[in-house]
Image (cartoon, helix red, strand yellow):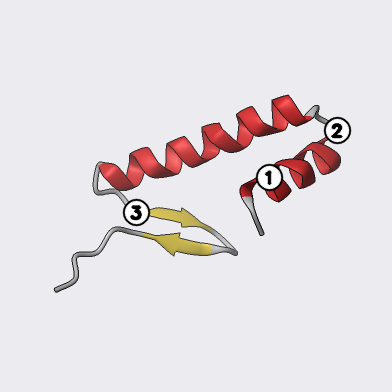
Amino acid sequence: MLKKEIVNKVADEAGLTKKQAAAAVESFLGAVKGSLARGDSVLLTGFGKFEVRTRE
């Protein structure tokens, strides 16, 4: 699924305009990226846990 498809799905299900949904998706992704950049993990219960790991 592409980000554009996620935006469309959020817009449809939340009753938002595509512009509003795009802003919400970008805000969410920014929060996740920011947490990971600080070294924090992100836990979305029922979906998954995201964390940065160093590989050789």
Q: Is residue 17 above or below residue 54?
A: above
The image shows residue 23 at horizontal and vertical percentages of: 62, 28
Q: Nearer the viewer, residue 43 or 56?
A: 56
**Could you tell whether 1 is left or right of 43 in the image?**
right
Q: Quadrant of the C terminus?
A: bottom left
Q: Which mark is residue 41?
A: 3
**Could you tell whether 17 is left or right of 37 in the image?**
right
Q: What residue is rendered at 28% in x and 58% in y?
A: 52
In what element is the residue under mark 2?
loop
Query: Mark 1: few, some, or many residues within 10 Å (few <14, many ≥20)?
Result: few
Query: Mark 2: few, some, or many residues within 10 Å (few <14, many ≥20)?
Result: few
**Could you tell whether 34 is left or right of 5 in the image?**
left
Which three-letter amino acid code belongs to the residue tagged 3? Ser
Which three-letter amino acid code belongs to the residue tagged 2? Gly
> Considering only order in the chain, which callout, 2 or 1, is on the residue closer to the N terminus?
1
Q: What residue is rendered at 19% in x and 71% in y?
A: 55
Q: What residue is rendered at 60% in x and 64% in y?
A: 46
In front: label 1 or label 2:
1
Q: Quadrant of the N terminus?
A: bottom right
Which three-letter amino acid code belongs to the residue tagged 1? Lys
> Considering only order in the chain, which callout, 1 or 3, is on the residue closer to the N terminus?
1
In front: label 3 or label 1:
1
Q: Quadrant of residue 13?
A: top right
Q: Which mark is residue 45?
A: none
Q: For mark 1, what is the residue?
A: 4
Question: What's the CA distance linking mark 3 and mark 1?
Answer: 25 Å
Question: What's the CA distance linking mark 1 and mark 2?
Answer: 16 Å
Question: What's the CA distance linking mark 3 and mark 2?
Answer: 30 Å
> Considering only order in the chain, which callout, 2 or 3, is on the residue closer to the N terminus?
2
